[in-house]
Image (cartoon, grey):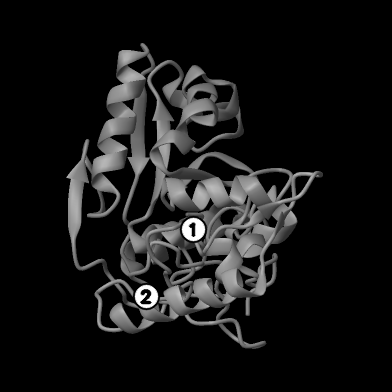
């Protein structure tokens, strides 16, 4: 018996959902919202034409949960120059240490597996940054502004409270082969960067800032900066052909601060 959630596959590869399938999906997701309302990870809100938007029923069907794009503890939270972390002094409830860096607990297993896989392939990945507190962000940002001027600094350094690192979901990778390329443009030429580009997605990590999507994300390319979102979401982003959380979820972005 076919699944009530299944789509009809059209000759050109597109999917078409019958009315009964759409209704079934909406009922399923409504149940998820109700069941997860009190969970530690915020459940997503429906798109309502304003404020926080989340993927609609067809986008997230098949995923194990529907997560918020605005709750700081959510694995799908979108943090950029338009959307700061709320509350501003947020810190993950659970932090674990991988290598010598702290990350949100949900990231730990996949990050550990990624590093082990790189080692098995003879690639010397290191970690240069994980979770950053609000105070630490303030220090980093002030140093960047003093060194490069505000306009140049803010192409690569987030203002305090606007950094993905504060969620504990973002990591900066380094290179054993060329340690001098840490957080530098030349990192993209390292064997570690090439390995990450090919394999990071297998462990749920998204290359967040690229030359192609900088107008959307608001940041210059950073071949070392990866954000954990989980494999399920990455699969759906690939199906859509989008590389940013902003485009997938319909959340505003860009180079200007709100």
| Front in this rendered view, residue 175 or 114 | 114
- Rendered view: 89 above or below 224: below
| Front in this rendered view, residue 228 or 222 | 228
Of marks 2 and 1, the one in the foreground: 1
Q: Residues within 10 Å of mark 2 (few under 14, many from 20)?
A: some
Please report the residue visible at 53 percent of the width from the left and 56 percent of the height from the top.
157
Q: Position of residue 48 (x, y in %)?
A: 62, 88
Tell me the element at label 2.
Answer: helix
Please report the residue visible at 36 percent of the width from the left and 63 percent of the height from the top.
167
Q: Position of residue 146 (x, y in %)?
A: 54, 58
- Rendered view: 35 above or below 141: below
- Rendered view: 26 above or below 236: below
Q: Residues within 10 Å of mark 1 (few under 14, many from 20)?
A: few
Q: Position of residue 112 (x, y in %)?
A: 25, 35
Residue 121 seen in the figure: yes
Q: Position of residue 52 (x, y in %)?
A: 55, 81
Q: What residue does disc 1 label?
A: 3
> Distance from label 2 to label 1 (Cα)?
18 Å
Residue 81 seen in the figure: no
Left or right: where 15 falls relative to 160: right
Please report the residue visible at 44 percent of the width from the left and 69 percent of the height from the top.
160
- Label total for image: 2
Would you identify the image quadrant in which residue 150 lies?
A: bottom right
Residue lying farthest front? 1
Please report the residue visible at 48 percent of the width from the left and 81 percent of the height from the top.
45
Would you identify the image quadrant in which residue 168 lies?
A: bottom left
Left or right: where 37 falls relative to 198: left
* Quarter of the image that includes the C terminus: bottom right
Q: What residue does disc 2 label?
A: 32
| Front in this rendered view, residue 248 or 83 | 248
Left or right: where 75 falls relative to 189: left
């Amino acid at each position: 018996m076919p699944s009530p959630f299944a789509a009809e596959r059209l000759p050109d590869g597109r999917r078409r959902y019958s009315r009964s399938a759409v209704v079934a999906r909406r009922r399923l997701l409504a149940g998820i919202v109700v069941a997860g309302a009190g969970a530690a990870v915020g459940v997503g809100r429906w798109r309502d034409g304003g404020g926080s938007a989340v993927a609609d029923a067809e986008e997230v069907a098949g995923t194990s949960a529907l997560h918020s794009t605005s709750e700081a503890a959510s694995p799908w939270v979108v943090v950029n120059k338009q959307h700061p972390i709320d509350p501003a002094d947020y810190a993950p409830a659970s932090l674990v240490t991988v290598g010598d860096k702290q990350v949100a607990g949900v990231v730990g297993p996949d990050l550990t597996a990624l590093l082990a896989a790189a080692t098995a392939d003879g690639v010397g990945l290191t970690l240069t940054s994980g979770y950053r507190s609000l105070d630490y962000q303030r220090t980093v940002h002030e140093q960047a502004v003093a060194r490069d001027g505000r306009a140049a600094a803010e192409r690569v350094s987030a203002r305090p409270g606007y950094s993905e690192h504060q969620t504990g979901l973002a990591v900066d990778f380094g290179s054993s082969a060329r340690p001098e390329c840490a957080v530098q443009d030349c990192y993209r030429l390292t064997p570690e960067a090439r390995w990450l580009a090919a394999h990071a997605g297998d462990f749920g990590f998204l290359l967040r800032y690229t030359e192609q999507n900088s107008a959307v994300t608001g940041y210059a390319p950073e071949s070392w900066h990866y954000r954990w979102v989980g494999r399920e979401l990455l699969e759906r982003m690939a199906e859509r052909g989008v590389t940013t959380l902003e485009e997938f979820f319909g959340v505003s972005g860009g180079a200007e601060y709100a």
